[in-house]
Amino acid sequence: MTHDAPLSFSPEVDTARQAGQPIVALESTIITHGMPFPQNLEMARRVEATIRDAGAVPATIAAMGGRIHVGLADDALQALAQTPPEQAMKLSRADLAVCLAQGRTGATTVAATMICAHLAGIRVFATGGIGGVHRGAETSFDISADLQELARTPVTVVAAGAKAILDLPKTWEVLETLGVPVIAYGQDELPAFWSRDSGIAAPLRMDSPAQIAAAAAMRARLGVSGGQLVANPIPPEAEIPRAEITPVIEQALAEAEAQGIAAKSVTPFLLQRIFQLTGGRSLESNIALVLNNARLAAAISVAMTQA
Ligand code: PSU
């Protein structure tokens, strides 16, 4: 590799790397901008424990003090969880280097976490839901950099689909155009974050971690750049059915528009508003789906190291 990235590994992740053990990358924007304190901290700890229970090592990623931290000690996780969103940069491909060069604190989105995971040699990453094409993108041009990153960086991302606040059909269209394999796990339809179904047929379906690991390995052998997206449906007991969540999403979107919320603030605003409108239920679902994705990502990383 030709890069000279300022990476700092936690002792646990460093040991795992040297031993060739399975590692799962985790993002930090979900902690700083995606969930309120203290549920964000509890979620982050439970996700890490879930990955360890499944036989892999968790590596939560964040930028601090001019370095990319890969694996956070519990005190760093706590500090991050208590950082007000306006004090942590929400990092994507465009601003990761700036944050590091200025020694600021930054939380990594899906796009930035993929870049950092790849630099660290980690091939699998678990999150909640990726960013995508925002509703009204035909006039706002608001499309998450997550999509472009999936097309460039060879990391398998496990998510419960794209967040249902987005324009899901347009999001899948863009991923198809970009050549990103979108794999529904264990069902024929794409999931829709809080809901298991979206009404949209999945382009690809796989039913085991081994199949997903084999697909990533073959892509590497072909020299085809980019990652793959595994769309893992939320467990049935935790879902909010589509008919119930749709009017809530529409209300939150209307409020965001009326208040002129734009750019990086849109997703955090909508998640927070949907949390209020559902009396906290959307957050419980969000945590359940992240844990479910962590379990699958760990199984994929185990399958990759066995291949
Ligand atoms: N998954 C969640 N909650 C989140 C995110 C993912 O359950 O908050 C974050 C990820 O970091 C993702 C970002 O990259 O939301 C997308 O933000 P935007 O729509 O502004 O690109």
Image (cartoon, helix red, strand yellow):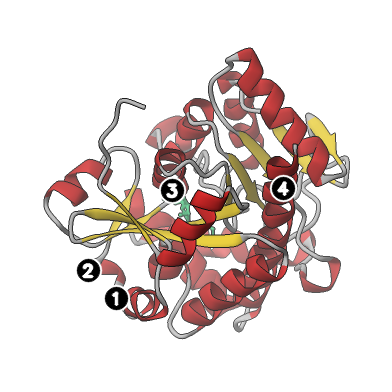
Residue under pointer 1? 83
| Mark 4 surroundings: few (<14), some (14-19) or many (≥20) residues within 10 A | many
Name the residue nearer the viewer: 252 or 13.
13
Quarter occupied by the C terminus: top right
On screen, residue 239 versus residue 145, left or right, reads: right
Residue 67: x, y in percent? 24, 54
Q: Nearer the viewer, mark 4 or mark 1?
A: 4
Q: Which mark is residue 253?
A: none
| Amino acid type of the residue tagged 2 in the rendering | Gln
Residue 125: x, y in percent? 57, 50
| Label 1 within 8 A of ligand 1 by Cβ | no
Q: Nearer the viewer, mark 4 or mark 2?
A: 4
Q: Which mark is residue 87?
A: 2
| Label 3 within 8 A of ligand 1 by Cβ | yes
Q: Nearer the viewer, mark 3 or mark 1?
A: 3
> Would residue 271 be seen by someone viewing this image from the given angle?
yes
Residue under pointer 3? 113
Callouts 1 and 2 close, C-beta under 8 Å: yes
C-alpha span from label 4 to label 2: 34 Å
Q: Residue at x 59, y 19 (%)?
A: 177
C-alpha span from label 2 to label 3: 19 Å
C-alpha span from label 4 to label 1: 32 Å
